[in-house]
């Protein structure tokens, strides 16, 4: 890494998804790692314990911050008044947000940052898969667990490049800049822009400006790759620097036959792939453009992509039979919901599609944001929306009624549930002959056993 003097590091909010992976990555590099959090759940708890990094007790303790620490890294889960953060400030220690530290660790590397409201995890995953397939040496930071990668963060001295999933959300409780502004990319990707995070970016214009800043940060001799069909991405990616290479992309040419999508190459060769949907065809095109700049030839790219199974929780197959498939997906924002539902309907056009969305995030449960869902849930034959009123209370949002939610989608037959048991009963009563089920959420449908549900659907 570029910071060999950082031998003792403390992570505040170490239990977070990406933060505990950073802790494990630093530990592997021989760094003395400590951490704290007020709640730590699996898989972070088990993984930290196995490495000897699990805090002895949950909670914050200012005494754990000592003058001999070389760095303190603060996760978004911590609050600005965190006592450990205050002690670190009092002692004048080096304090980093996650993106600041990743930049510090990769200052001497070529940095490829994948940004966008949707698709960035899949594009990043695709690039990592291709590079690994061909034995390239690279570091990375990605927001999902990937098959074949035991950590979501890798930092080494040897790798000449780092691939980073560039989240637009805030860097830390005391740094209100979007994460992807801090990585200082050489190659940047904007996969699309669809207003999200209303609690931080109150207007579409304010949200879009964060991507415009990212685009303008592309340096001399750098490259900006963007979705040519996304109006908002086009607006911020208008060539404005003659020293920057601007590369538009669209969905990869393809054919669908018997439920299998195949890529069509420039040589008219057909390459069957294991993912599907127009959004994934766009993701593949974006990844191909990045890999081309990194020296991966076309035939080598296709060879690797043919074995790509997708990122965890992104159109993840739970179970299938001769007449039904059950998928779960991380989709929750309007653009992701629309892309995922459309993809499954187009892949199996002759089957009924039952799709269920859980409203779980701050934006999706905000009455001011709900109208953004209009027209995004038209593809399924049966459209179902679920939310838990207790989550609204926890997020200190005003109450929502099922009628309000139904009205926002502008679909008269949408079914809205606020009880997970009633939701499960409704789904179990459906006729699953020649029908597919899609469950979409960044949550858990309040602990609904999706594996059991998938078995009931495919065995019906």
Image (tube, helix red, strand yellow):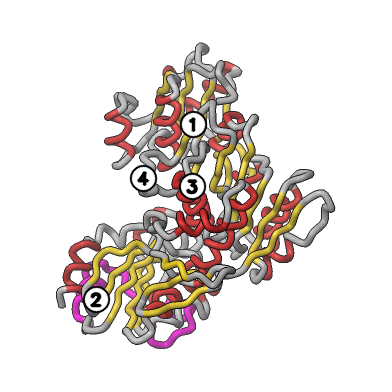
Residue closest to the eye, 46 or 309: 309
- Lower sequence index among marks 1 and 4: 1
Label drawn at residue 82: 1
- Provide the residue designation for mark 4: 148
Within 10 Å of the Cα at label 3, are there few (<14), some (14-19), or many (20+) other Cα atoms?
Answer: many
Rendered location of residue 10, percent (x, y) = 46, 24
Q: Nearer the viewer, mark 2 or mark 3?
A: 3
- Lower sequence index among marks 1 and 3: 1
Q: Nearer the viewer, mark 1 or mark 3?
A: 3
| Residue bounds of the magenta highlight | 405-429
- Provide the residue designation for mark 3: 128
- Provide the residue designation for mark 2: 427
Could you tell me which secondary element the residue under label 4 belongs to? loop
- Lower sequence index among marks 4 and 2: 4
- Lower sequence index among marks 2 and 1: 1
Picture quarter with the N terminus = top right
Question: In the image, is residue 39 part of the stretch drawn in magenta?
Answer: no
Separation of marks 2 and 1 at Cα, in angstroms? 43 Å
Question: In the image, is residue 415 part of the stretch drawn in magenta?
Answer: yes
Q: Height in image: 1 above or below 288?
A: above
């Amino acid at each position: 890494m570029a910071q060999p003097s950082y031998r003792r590091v403390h992570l505040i909010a170490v239990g977070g998804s990406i933060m505990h992976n950073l802790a494990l990555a630093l530990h592997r590099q021989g760094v003395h790692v400590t951490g704290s959090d007020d709640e730590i759940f699996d898989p972070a708890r088990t993984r930290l314990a196995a490495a000897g990094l699990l805090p002895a007790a949950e909670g914050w303790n200012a005494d754990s911050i000592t003058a001999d620490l070389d760095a303190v890294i603060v996760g978004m889960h911590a609050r600005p008044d965190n006592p450990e953060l205050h002690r670190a400030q009092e002692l004048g220690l080096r304090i980093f947000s996650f993106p600041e530290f990743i930049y510090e660790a990769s200052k001497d590397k070529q940095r490829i940052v994948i940004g966008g409201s949707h698709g960035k995890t899949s594009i990043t995953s695709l690039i990592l898969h291709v590079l690994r397939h061909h034995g390239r040496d690279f570091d990375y930071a990605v927001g999902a667990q990937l098959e074949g990668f035991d950590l979501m963060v890798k930092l080494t001295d040897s790798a000449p490049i780092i691939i980073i999933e560039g989240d637009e959300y805030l860097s830390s409780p005391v740094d209100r800049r979007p994460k992807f502004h801090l990585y200082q990319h050489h190659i940047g990707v904007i996969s699309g822009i669809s207003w999200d995070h209303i609690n931080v970016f109150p207007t579409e214009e304010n949200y879009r400006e964060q991507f415009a800043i990212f685009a303008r940060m592309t340096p001399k001799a750098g490259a900006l790759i963007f979705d040519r069909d996304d109006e908002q991405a086009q607006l911020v990616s208008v060539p404005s620097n003659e020293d920057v290479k601007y590369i538009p992309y669209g969905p990869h040419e393809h054919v669908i036959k018997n439920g299998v999508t195949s890529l069509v190459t420039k040589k008219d060769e057909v390459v069957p792939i294991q993912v599907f949907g127009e959004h994934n065809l766009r993701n593949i095109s974006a990844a191909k453009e990045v890999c081309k700049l990194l020296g991966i030839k076309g035939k080598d790219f296709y060879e690797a992509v043919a074995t790509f199974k997708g990122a965890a929780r992104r159109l993840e197959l739970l179970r299938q039979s001769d007449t039904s498939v059950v998928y779960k997906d991380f989709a929750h924002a309007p653009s992701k919901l629309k892309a995922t539902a459309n993809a499954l309907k187009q892949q199996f056009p002759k089957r009924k599609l039952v799709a269920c969305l859980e409203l779980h995030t701050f934006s999706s449960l905000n009455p001011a944001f709900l109208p953004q869902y209009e027209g995004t849930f038209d593809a399924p034959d049966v459209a179902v929306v679920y939310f838990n009123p207790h989550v609204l209370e926890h997020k200190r949002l005003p109450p929502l009624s099922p009628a309000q939610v139904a009205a926002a989608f502008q679909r008269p037959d949408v079914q809205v549930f606020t009880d997970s048991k009633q939701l499960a009963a409704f789904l179990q009563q459906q006729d699953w002959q020649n029908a597919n089920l899609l469950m979409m959420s960044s949550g858990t449908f309040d602990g609904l056993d999706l594996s059991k549900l998938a078995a009931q659907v495919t065995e019906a």
